[in-house]
Amino acid sequence: MKYLDALPRYIFFTGKGGVGKTSVACATAVDLIDQGRRVLLVSTDPASNVGHVFGQRIGNQIMPIVAAPGLDALEIEPEQAAADYRERTLAPVRGFLSAVDLASVTEQLSGACTTEIASFNEFTGLLADTDQTLAYDHIIFDTAPTGHTIRLLQLPGEWTRFIDDGKGDTSCLGPMAGLEKSRTTYGRALAALADPARTRLVLVARAQPGALTEAARTVDELVDAGVSATHLVVNAILPTDPDHDPLADAICDRETAALAALPPQLADLTIDLLPLRGTDMVGVPALRGLLREESAAVPLPPADDWSAADPVLPGLDSLVGALAEQDHGLVMCMGKGGVGKTTVATAIARRLVARGKDVHLTTTDPAAHLDLSLAHEGMRVSSINPEQAVADYRSHVMATKGATLDDDGRAQLAEDLRSPCTEEIAVFQAFSQAVLDARRRFVIMDTAPTGHTLLLLDATGSYHHDVARNMTPGTRFTTPMMRLQDPGYTKVIIVTLAETTPVLEAEQLQADLERAGIHPWAWVVNQTLTGNPTTDPLLRRRQAAERGPLDRVGRARARSVQVPLTAGDPATSGAAIHSAIA
């Protein structure tokens, strides 16, 4: 693997959801400790599954990995990081503030913006060569799907410039006395990110047009953030089947075509091609087999005799039929990155239009790109673009709140609106408008990968509590959170794959949603090999491995369906063929 040559101290793995970032990051960590290096593996994904890969609980504190001596790991948990951050901020002043002032500061530090800042501070602290990390030869970052990671990598520069300007509202960063320390830490983090001798950024993708296009877009956005990607790993390429199984041949043909049409931004990178393996990347032996051919040839389990030619669960039409009993409502497709939320949301939208329904298809994923040509099929198509949302929000605030201020007041308000926190508020406002639109039509919402979506719902919950706290008793009101909690208004569909880790992550997502009073309506197991006759030995092993996850979903969910992978065109079949074999 060329990306392993002369590795610097910091290594970032990023890319579209579901391409195998965690598998490659964990395998790299294991490979380095096998060479006698001390390694810290850090997940910045709010929906991290590094703990599941190594079979132990990790969390928001650095923990030794029992199965891999020499390797420590940390999962940055936004809520715990925010709680620790609030305590560090409030503890020094708790004895000096009145009850009213303390309540005011506590409320100020309870929003989604504080959650983002807290996670960001944990991230920059690890890059600033503190005592916490000096013992490690390498620090590997397994990042969240692209949109969330681009935001994280942009923040050191944005906050550094905002503090240096010294004009806007920095209350989210805590007491003013800490600003100089923050400035130093952010500056050191920014310098480390921009130095190729200290940091290597590796893009991970699949040999499929969507993943490669997103990787190319990431190259451009990273340059804007002052960071350069130098390596590309194309993961899970299916070897050619000598017996020419039709399904295997279709996959190989598409992967070959995708690599032949590599975007120009990627062509100059150092490229590694990783073959598809027959086992899930769980446990140290499997991780060793991902990067080393000699290790991969040994532990493949035999395929069993389970007949997988027939689907186990009903098809997507059964869900669409139930939805079509109404004429409006919000349908949210949620799940981890790479499970096919966009494909499922688009398929549902098109089938509702075919039944004569008024449909608005939208996405909250900053890295997603819906097919705008769908607007010609009789539906409205939109996306919540953070840049546009911020521009709209600033214009609205200046035109309303700013209209009553004098010139100095408007100048101060404009400075405050340049805060990086403004993006969180603006995106929430745009999300709330989309939720409201479901009063009149179907709004089919393709959401960002799990962690990013949970942060958006956290902002929705914070807004609800703020409104409820300030309402006069007896006043009737409806917040976006109340609409999400109303099963007659909102139908949440959890999308997953027929694999152990995605199903476990989907169950965790369901538990997180239910704690927020939101009860998922249905599950879609997307892109199943089950339901496809295939003779390819590797695909049959993957197919046999689907039995347990499919049985688990079918037993536990009253309303669950599957969408089989097909050999046809994913754009018309409703199933993205490549990501099914993650």
Image: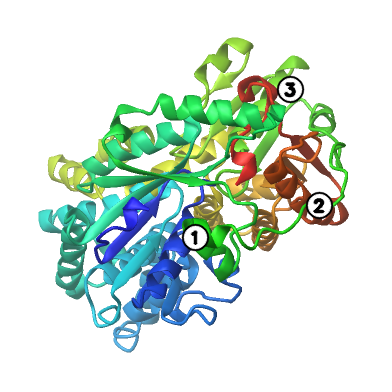
Q: CA distance from mark 2 to mark 1?
A: 29 Å
Which of discs 1 and 3 lies nearer the camera? The answer is 1
The reply to whether discs 1 and 3 touch (Cβ–Cβ < 8 Å) is no
Residue farthest to the top, as pictured: 376
**Residue type, numbered disc 3:** Leu
Does 72 sit left or right of 566 as displayed?
left
Secondary structure at badge 1 equals: loop
Q: CA distance from mark 1 to mark 3?
A: 33 Å
Secondary structure at badge 2 equals: helix
Does 344 sit left or right of 411 as displayed?
right
**Residue type, numbered disc 2:** Arg
Q: Residue 547 — which label?
A: 2
Q: Nearer the viewer, residue 328 or 273?
A: 273
Name the residue located 64 percent from the left edge and 41 percent from the top edge: 580
Which of discs 3 and 2 lies nearer the camera? The answer is 2
Where residue 365 sits in the image (x, y, percent)? 49, 40
Name the residue located 59 percent from the left edge and 45 percent from the top edge: 480
